[in-house]
Amino acid sequence: MKKKIEQEKLDKVLEAGRVAPTAANFQPQRIFVLESDEALAQAKSVTPFCFNAPIVLLICWDRNVSWKAIDGHDSGVVDATIAITQMMLEAQDLGLGTCWVRGYDKRVLDKVFGLPANLESVALLPIGYPDKRSKPHSVHYSRIPIENMVSYL
C-alpha cells in the first residue's frame, strides 16, 4: 500500500515551486497535481516511470505569460525547471522521494491530459515515501571532473 503524503507536506512542495525565481517575475510555471486514480493511470499510460507514487506533479509553463528576451529567447522552460528543482529539494528535506521524469513522448502526454496550446509540458515529478529497499541507479553518482565543466576567464 502506498503511504499517503500529508497535505501539509504537499503544500510545502507546491509552495517551493510557487516562490521559485522566474525571469522578470512573470511566474509562468503551471503545476497539475495528479492524485486521482484516473489521473495517475493517465500518467502511467505515457511513462513507466511513475514508481507507484501516490502523487505525480505535471509541471508546465504558459507561453502567454513567460518572459521573452529581445533576441527571441523564451524563459518559460528555464523558469519551470527552476521551480522543479526547488520542489525536488523541498521534497527531499521533507523526507519524500522524487525524481525528474522526462521519459515519455511529450506529444502523447499533452494529448492525454488535454493541455491547451499555450501550455508546454516540461516534466513529471512522482512524489512519495521511498521504499526502504530503494537505491539510486549507479549512474546517479557518476560525475565528470570539475575541470571538464568549469573554466576561469
Image (tube, grey):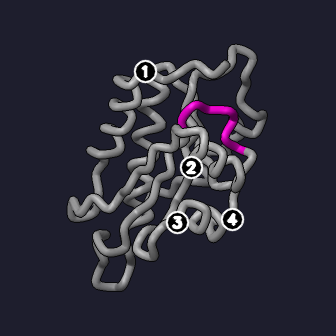
In the rendered image, which residue does mark 4 sit on? Answer: 105
Q: CA distance from mark 4 to mark 1?
A: 31 Å
Q: Amino acid at mark 1?
A: Glu
Q: CA distance from mark 2 to mark 3?
A: 15 Å
Q: Work out whether mark 2 precedes mark 3 in sequence or the reverse, and give the earlier one.
A: 3
**Percent position (x, y) of residue 26?**
23, 63
Above/below status of 121 relative to 141? below
Q: CA distance from mark 4 to mark 2?
A: 12 Å
In the rendered image, which residue does mark 3 sit on? Answer: 114
Do callouts 4 and 2 mark residues in contact (Cβ within 8 Å)?
no
Q: Work out whether mark 4 precedes mark 3 in sequence or the reverse, and give the earlier one.
A: 4
**Percent position (x, y) of residue 11?**
34, 31
Q: CA distance from mark 1 to mark 2?
A: 20 Å
Residue in the image at 51% along x and 62% along y: 121
| Furthest residue toward front | 38
Q: Amino acid at mark 2?
A: Leu
Which range is magenta?
Answer: 49-55
In the rendered image, which residue does mark 1 sit on? Answer: 6
In this rendering, the label closer to the viewer, 4 or 3: 3
In this rendering, the label closer to the viewer, 2 or 3: 3
**Percent position (x, y) of residue 120?**
47, 68
In the rendered image, which residue does mark 2 sit on? Answer: 124
Q: Work out whether mark 4 precedes mark 1 in sequence or the reverse, and give the earlier one.
A: 1
Residue in the image at 61% along x and 62% along y: 112
Q: Amino acid at mark 4?
A: Asp
Q: Work out whether mark 4 precedes mark 2 in sequence or the reverse, and give the earlier one.
A: 4
> In this orientation, which residue lies closer to the viewer: 29 or 137?
29
**Is 144 contained in the magenta span?**
no
**Percent position (x, y) of residue 56?**
55, 41
Q: CA distance from mark 4 to mark 3?
A: 14 Å
Quarter location, residue 2? top right
